Amino acid sequence: MSHVRPSTSMRAATYPPGYPDGWYRLAASSDLGPGEVQYRECLGRELIVYRSADGSTVHAMSAFCPHLGANLAGGCVKGKRIECPFHQWQLCEDGKVGHIPYADKLPTRARQETWPVRERYGQIFMWYSGGDRVASANDVPAYEIPDIPEVDDGRFVFRGRHDANTVHMHLIEFAENSVDFAHFAPVHGKMFVPWTAITVPGIAVEHVADWEPDPEHSHLAYFKNRAVLHAFGRVLERTRASAMITFIGPGSVVTFRFTIPDMGEIVMFQTHLPLSPMEQKVDFHWFADKSMPRLLVSYVIGNWVSQWANDIDIWENKIYLDKPILAKGDGPIHRMRRWYSQFYP
Ligand code: FES
Ligand SMILES: [Fe+2]
């Protein structure tokens, strides 16, 4: 690719809006201790995420104080409230003004925007729903983040995380990638040394994929990928492995279940947080059967991350075609797009 790149604004104009409804990962639980506050710009908002003083709850609130606009990220957590550093107004976790040190009468109409937050699998997620109305922590999300029983009951243990660089792509591209069957051979047909862009000579990867929405839970879709390695033209049967990939919403939270015959299972989360419509913060974190050797787990995850990275140069330079010209052999791109449109109610 030459160093002359298509402009982001031109590319952005070809895509659907940048922030479909869904759960978005804001931070790792371990990065936010009791009473800690962090500032974020994402999803077209400026917000703070903070943990209550006793550590039990996490809250997301728009960042600038309704009084005179100070940044609440510089404030101090009091119980479940945040106290502004400027004139020490306190805002409750539902966004209402709870206390003004120098006034008895509180402004009752004022309410800061807040969002529903959940903490699952050691991660902090926020429910974002578009539109013009002011979100509230008391909103009822369209669905919850599903349980992963093996993670919840401790059979799978946390085995690592990887914070990728920001990728200059639209969120829908990640979903579209899974139904774009014709790109697997040209873009993902080579074997890489895990965690690197170094190809392994003589080794080819064959992929067989399918994609289906969940018949009962419309916000879920499943992408199954079975892969096997070929060495100098011969199929290596022992390398057969399968991945079950679940889209929980619009690609903001995606789980991967890798099954390695005779060894066990790995569950990986890949999350996308749009910092702007064409900028995704991408994070990976994973859990595995306790008995699985750590090196094998790292090998499997590293394989995936290397293959994922191979799409980036395409994603960062492409536009979105509303009416693509398709051929036999292309995957169910239109079906996926119809499924995806539910996240833009
Ligand atoms: S700006 Fe926050 S209390 Fe005045
Ligand atoms: Fe891809």
Image (cartoon, grey):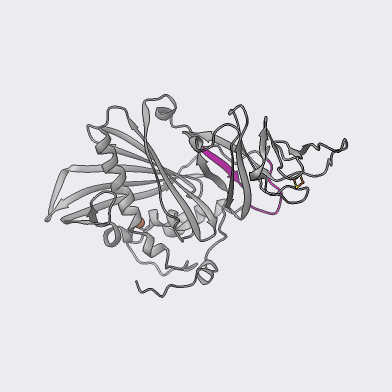
Residue 268 image point, x, y percent: 38, 40
Whether residue 227 is visible here, answered yes or no, is yes
Quarter holding the N terminus is bottom left
- Place residue 241 in its image quadrant: top left
Q: Residue at 41% across / 75% down in the picture?
A: 4
Q: How many marks?
A: 0
Q: Quadrant of residue 327?
A: bottom left
Magenta region, main secondary structure: loop
Q: Can residue 217 be seen by looking at this rendering?
A: no
Q: Is residue 334 above or below residue 241?
A: below
Identify the magenta region.
124-136
Residue situated in front as seen by the camera: 4 or 67: 67
Q: Position of residue 314 (x, y in %)?
A: 38, 64
Residue 63's x, y, as percent?
A: 66, 48
**Nearer to us in this view, 54 or 208:** 54
Question: Position of 32 compared to 255: left or right?
Answer: right
Based on the picture, tell me whether residue 230 belongs to the magenta stretch.
Answer: no
Q: Locate residue 80 relative to residue 237 in the image: left or right.
A: right
- Between 180 and 87, the residue placed more toward the observer is 87
Q: Residue at x 50, y 38 (%)?
A: 31
